[in-house]
Image (spheres, rainbow, N blue to C red):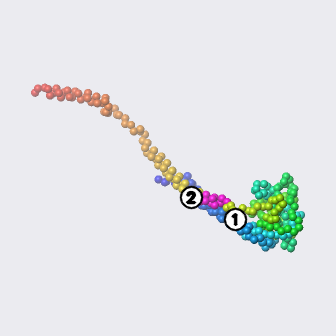
């Protein structure tokens, strides 16, 4: 009845289905872990943004990677801007997430506390990308900057390729180690993403707070993969039953065909049952009846 399952076609189909089930389950857990990571990150961002500001030197030091737990922490830094070594970071989007321009990255000299990089915000790219753009001047004298503490960018972590041969004072990544080589002095690891004071006329445009409300579609994707995994055996059973039904119907059609159409053919000389046959019987019986009548009428 189910011998067709041993055919090459059905063996391959079954093996493919068995391979798909664990793969889909694994993909579902991968999306679920991404969901958990996103939720944990949102919670971390929320705690960091609402934490009491601390001096930047309490969280970071030259050559020491910023711990993940300190990401997005609000920090303060007091010093003077070193505009002579200011650079712009290429291919960055504005708050509308569509307009391409630059981030303005300016070293802030903390005096005896070293130097920290400050992302002062976003500016439009302008027409000539081979020249250093017109950058709004940084405040003069001693300033106090408040902002979010961010980790150094790397190609592995950001996906941004660190291209070489860029125009003067243009970079692809915000990285304290790279800038320390250019400045020839120690630079605190990470950088500050400025949130205060507000810039005149919002130029440069301050980087908005990171999104920490949306959890993304990862949980929905996980559920979809698990539903796909559950649908494989169900679909296999449906296909098996359909195949069995089709084979049984084909076998029944074959057994019911014997080469005749079910109509009897009268043999020559066979007695029929129609009117002509009745008349023939009557004609054949008449002489016998007449002979019997004459015999009965003859006297002994």
Check the image and report above or below for 103 versus 275: below
Q: Where does residue 267 sit, x and y in percent of width and height?
A: 34, 34
Q: Residue furthest left?
A: 300
State the image coordinates of residue 113 (x, y, percent, origin top left).
84, 73
Mark 1 vs 2, N-terminal side: 1
Camera-nearest residue between 209 and 241: 209
Label 1 – label 2 distance at C-alpha = 31 Å
Label 2 Cα neighbours within 10 Å, binned few <14 / some 14-19 / many ≥20:
some
State the extent of the magenta-drawn residues as a range: 216-227
Task: Report whether 82 appears left or right of 15.
Answer: right
> Does residue 43 show up?
yes
Q: Is residue 222 magenta?
A: yes
Which image quadrant for residue 208? bottom right
Q: Are marks 1 and 2 in contact (CB under 8 Å)?
A: no
- Residue 95 x/y as whole percent: 77, 58
Left or right of residue 273: residue 149: right
Residue under numbered circle 2? 230
Using the rendered view, name the quadrant where residue 86 is placed: bottom right
Q: Is residue 284 above or below residue 163?
A: above
Say whether residue 239 is left or right of residue 82.
left
Whole-percent x and y of residue 100?
79, 55
> Residue 42 bears which disc, if any?
1
Q: Name the secondary structure under disc 1.
A: helix
Q: Residue at x 74, y 70 (%)?
A: 51
Q: Secondary structure at mark 2?
A: helix
Instruction: Give whichever of 221, 138 is nearer the camera.
Output: 138
Splitting the image into 4 quarters, where does residue 106 fall?
Answer: bottom right
Q: Quadrant of the C terminus?
A: top left
């Amino acid at each position: 009845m189910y011998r067709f399952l041993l055919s090459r076609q059905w063996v391959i189909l079954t093996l493919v289905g068995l391979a798909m089930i664990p793969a889909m389950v694994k993909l579902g857990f991968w999306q679920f872990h991404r969901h958990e990571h996103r939720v944990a990150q949102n919670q971390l961002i929320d705690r960091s943004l609402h934490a009491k500001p601390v001096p930047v030197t309490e969280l970071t030091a030259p050559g020491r990677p910023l711990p993940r737990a300190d990401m997005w922490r609000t920090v303060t830094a007091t010093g003077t801007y070193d505009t002579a070594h200011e650079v712009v970071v290429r291919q960055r989007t504005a708050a509308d997430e569509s307009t391409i321009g630059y981030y303005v990255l300016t070293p802030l000299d903390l005096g005896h506390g070293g130097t920290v990089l400050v992302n002062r915000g976003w500016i439009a790219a302008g027409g000539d990308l081979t020249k250093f753009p017109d950058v709004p001047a940084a405040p003069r004298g001693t300033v106090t900057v408040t902002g979010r503490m961010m980790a150094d960018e790397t190609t592995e972590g950001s996906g941004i390729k660190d291209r070489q041969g860029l125009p003067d004072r243009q970079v692809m990544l915000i990285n304290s180690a790279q800038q320390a080589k250019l400045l020839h002095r120690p630079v605190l690891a990470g950088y500050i993403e400025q949130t205060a004071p507000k810039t005149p006329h919002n130029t440069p445009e301050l980087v908005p707070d990171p999104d920490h409300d949306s959890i993304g579609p990862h949980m929905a994707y996980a559920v979809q993969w698990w539903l796909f995994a559950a649908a494989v055996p169900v679909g296999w059973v449906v296909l098996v039953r359909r195949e069995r039904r089709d084979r049984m119907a084909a076998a029944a059609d074959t057994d019911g065909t014997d080469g005749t159409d079910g109509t009897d053919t009268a043999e020559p000389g066979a007695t029929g049952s129609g009117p002509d046959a009745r008349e023939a019987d009557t004609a054949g019986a008449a002489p016998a009846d007449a002979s019997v009548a004459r015999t009965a009428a003859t006297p002994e």
